[in-house]
């Protein structure tokens, strides 16, 4: 980062709804054929788990979004006092590696559950997003730059 | 909820490191064979996207955890003023449905990127977690109850 | 909410940097004289607490923002499975009331610490924001409507 | 941080409900007399703002906790790609300094609103929390150590 940073105002892979509305055949050409992600059996396993416990009543999109938040908070807690370098080595400690794995799993479980409840196709969603991002962050202009696309 | 609620103190699918340390063959028996989730090609696509832009330097686990937080915040924003019932209907509005899809994709992209950077096997992680949760939330005792497992 | 909700896309009191850049004398007229908030002694107590433990080294704005996230996650966890009605009654249970109070305190402590480290005047910040919001959400047009100001 | 970090598992100022249940006269002795924080007029100004717009109906504790999450996400976004050093210099850029100020204000507004709706006394809450933390993090043992109190 520069001495007097202009902090990036966005994640490295954002995309406003407008940009996402259309999918770029150009960018899509960079994506492999076949699904980028397949979480169907995970969604089925979670649905069964919830159904067996009569938990569907708690799994409104609103509630699941909150549960997702709480789990991300637990994940962030593992990194909050670490330097970036140390965060790369977090898995060197077995007990911590397990905690990280477990928190990532918790976040993933709620995210795929939320997608299922809202009938969102995860593969279609990420393909659309990656395609939009490829248009918004041309490699030549975005190289080594974490600035928001609007600042490129 | 009761008139004088004892609010649930945990997500419906939590698990402390201790419980996760061992995996339950019993609970595992409930899980289908084969991967619950396969995100390898998504991780490869994201890695390529980042490499082409020389963004690996920004993708420390610490930074990715923060980016994940910011994206979850954008997802939560879509539901914050909605009733639970309305949150189920959020996808009825096409523009909103697209925003929800895009925000879910943003969260998913950073989550699988974080897992890749930390060398976490997503399928192994969710299998271990679901198995641990099956032990902690026996269907007969957890039925219709959102209480934390410690309160069951 | 309507049967086919157009979900609000923003908090009820948002404000883009542009709108905040200027402060509205009109809206300011609605604000009482004297400070809206005085947290100076809290900031001094936290600074002393950190200094006595040589914790300043951990309190970078980046780290404090992460710690704030983790605490908010713990606060959200208390409400995630509750209906809105039940969330109003959360304090009826003494043990839960204490947890809510403690989590709110944790969030507040990190927020005022972050402001202190960044030399942000909290009173000036909220005055500026409330003034900007008064311009963006005219009472007559925003009444009973949680839509984002851009949708008013 | 050590080469093989045992990452801190908790914020620097946490406290379980148990520890907070009682307040330490010893630790309290370190706190100045008089309120550490006074946000009464801010709470009144926000209450008036909401009442004038008939927004009380949206301000359930559950919804406010979500709005708080979304605002924290916007704050975190400003720091996510910055090094810790750069995060200290974030205010060197005027436009960014204003964004930081505005996001901190947004978080503060929802936090004090949530406390008001739940009838939580902010000064009492932070006094109780700081007193509990003073007991859990003795200066001599916590010095220069970001480990969770359970690991001290």
Image: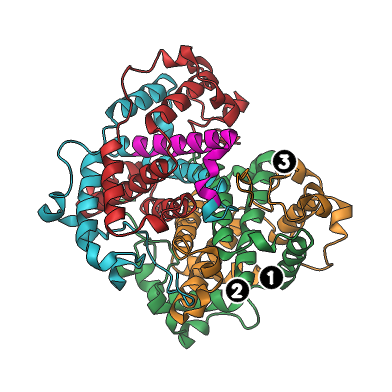
Chain colours: A cyan, B red, C green, D orange
Q: CA distance from mark 2 to mark 3?
A: 34 Å
Secondary structure mostly seen in the magenta stretch: helix
Q: Which residue is mark 3?
A: D151
Q: CA distance from mark 1 to mark 2?
A: 8 Å
Q: CA distance from mark 3 to mark 1?
A: 31 Å
Marks 3 and 1: same chain?
no
Q: Position of residue C95 (x, y in %)?
A: 69, 39
Secondary structure under badge 3? helix
Decide which of C69, A94 is in the foreground and name it.
A94
Residue at (57%, 42%) from the top-left corner? Answer: C78
Decide which of B53, C94 is in the foreground and name it.
B53
Residue at (67%, 50%) from the top-left corner? Answer: C101
Decide which of C132, B85 is in the foreground and name it.
C132
Answer whether labels 1 and 2 touch (C-beta < 8 Å).
yes
Q: Position of residue B58 (x, y in %)?
A: 41, 58
Secondary structure under badge 2? helix
First in sequence, mark 1 or 2: give its number: 1
Q: In the figure, D25 relative to B41: above or below?
A: below
Answer whether labels 3 and 1 touch (C-beta < 8 Å).
no
Q: Chain of mark 2?
A: C
Q: Which residue is mark 1?
A: C39
Q: Position of residue B128 (x, y in %)?
A: 46, 25
Q: Residues within 10 Å of mark 2 (few under 14, many from 20)?
A: many
Q: Which residues are magenta?
A: A86-114
């Amino acid at each position: 980062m520069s001495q007097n940073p202009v902090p990036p105002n966005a994640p490295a892979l954002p995309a406003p709804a407008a940009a996402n509305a259309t999918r770029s055949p150009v960018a899509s050409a960079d994506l492999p054929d076949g699904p980028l992600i397949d979480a169907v059996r995970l969604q089925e396993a979670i649905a069964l788990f919830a159904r067996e416990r009569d938990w569907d009543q708690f799994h409104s999109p609103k509630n699941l979004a909150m549960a997702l938040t709480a789990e991300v908070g637990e994940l962030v807690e593992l990194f909050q006092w670490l330097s970036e370098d140390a965060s790369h080595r977090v898995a060197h400690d077995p007990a911590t590696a397990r905690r990280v794995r477990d928190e990532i799993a918790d976040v993933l479980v709620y995210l795929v559950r939320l997608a299922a409840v809202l009938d969102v196709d995860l593969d279609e969603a990420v393909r659309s997003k990656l395609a939009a991002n490829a248009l918004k962050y041309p490699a030549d202009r975005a190289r080594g730059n974490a600035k928001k696309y609007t600042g490129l």
